[in-house]
Image (tube, rainbow, N blue to C red):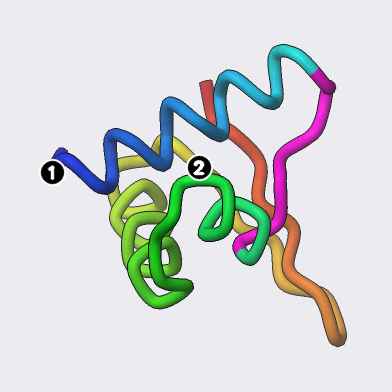
């Protein structure tokens, strides 16, 4: 896992533990001062690694931690 992917995962996990839900991609990008495409790429890597599950429904995607 590269630095950005690790940073995104740790941030998402921390907020999920605190709030019970994950931030949006846009919120994550803003909070970590990253570009949206960097967060999207990191989430794609996390999905490949089995650390997140993405459920696509019309006009929305739901991201959940797998562990």
In this rendering, the answer to whether 43 lies above or below 18 is below
How far apart marks 2 and 1 lie (CA) works out to 16 Å
At label 1, counting other C-alpha atoms closer than 10 Å, the crowd grade (few under 14, some 14-19, many 20 or more) is few
| Label at residue 2 | 1
Closer to us: 36 or 16: 36
13 left or right of 57? left
Q: Residue furthest left?
A: 2
50 left or right of 21? left
Closer to us: 55 or 20: 20
Residue at (46%, 46%) from the top-left corner? 32
- Queried whether the magenta region covers residue 11, the answer comes back as no
In this rendering, the answer to whether 33 lies above or below 5 is below
Question: Which quadrant does the N terminus fall into?
Answer: top left
Q: Magenta part of the protein: which range?
A: 19-25
Q: Residue furthest bottom?
A: 59
Residue 35 on image: x %, y %: 40, 71
In this rendering, the answer to whether 1 lies above or below 24 is above
Residue under circle 2? Answer: 52
Check whether the beta carbons of the residues at disc 2 and disc 1 lie within 8 A of each other: no
Residue at (83%, 22%) from the top-left corner? 20
Closer to us: 26 or 20: 26
Magenta-highlighted stretch: main secondary structure? loop
Residue 57 on image: x %, y %: 82, 75
- Queried whether the magenta region covers residue 21, the answer comes back as yes
Label 1 element class: loop
Residue 9 on image: x %, y %: 42, 35
Mark whose residue sits in front, 2 or 1: 1
Label 2 element class: strand
């Amino acid at each position: 896992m590269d630095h950005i992917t690790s940073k995104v995962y740790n941030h998402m996990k921390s907020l999920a533990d605190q709030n019970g839900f994950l931030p949006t991609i846009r919120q994550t990008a803003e909070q970590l001062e990253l570009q949206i495409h960097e967060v999207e790429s990191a989430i794609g890597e996390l999905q490949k690694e089995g650390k997140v599950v993405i459920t696509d429904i019309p006009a929305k995607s739901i991201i959940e931690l797998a562990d």
